[in-house]
Amino acid sequence: MMKKVVWSSKAQKNYRDNLLYLKEFWTKKEIKRFIFLVDKAVHAISQNPYIGSVYEENYRYRKYLVTEQIYLYYRLTQENEILLASFWNNYQNPDQLKEFLL
């Protein structure tokens, strides 16, 4: 059974920022690929919320690899929905992620 997926404002902003970056530095093909991979990841998570691995620094969150450099962090809410928390570029400082997901 698919679970309802809710995008946090941070996840929406991260997603838009990634698209803007791709638009500036990459081709339409890469943009379409990123959108496809995000859709695929969100669908997979909605069907099986435990598909992602547990984030070691905060066990409430799980992470799912969307592309080689981007993880999608999410968690189950008390309402049994999936909250997309952040699209995180692995090249960023990991200490910032810990603060981001508090």
Image (spheres, grey):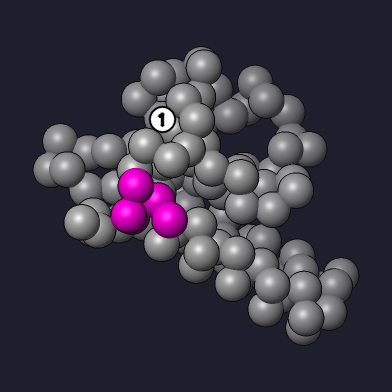
- In this picture, is 83 found above or below 2? above
Q: Position of residue 26 (x, y in %)?
A: 85, 73
Q: Position of residue 52 (x, y in %)?
A: 47, 38
Q: Position of residue 2 (x, y in %)?
A: 25, 58
As drawn, which residue projects farthest toward the bottom?
28
Give the side of residue 48 with respect to residue 92, left or right.
left
Q: Quadrant of the C terminus?
A: top left
Find out whether residue 46 is within the magenta segment: yes
Name the foreground residue: 75 vs 100: 75
Name the foreground residue: 58 vs 102: 58
Q: Position of residue 35 (x, y in %)?
A: 60, 71
- In this picture, is 89 found above or below 34? above
- What residue span does the magenta drawing correspond to? 44-48
Query: Which corner quadrant of the image does residue 4 belong to?
Result: bottom left
Is residue 8 something that shows in the picture? no
User: Magenta stretch mostly in which secondary structure?
Assistant: helix
According to the image, label 1 marks what residue? 61
Is residue 93 something that shows in the picture? yes
Question: Going 77% across and 83% down the picture, which residue do you hit?
Answer: 28
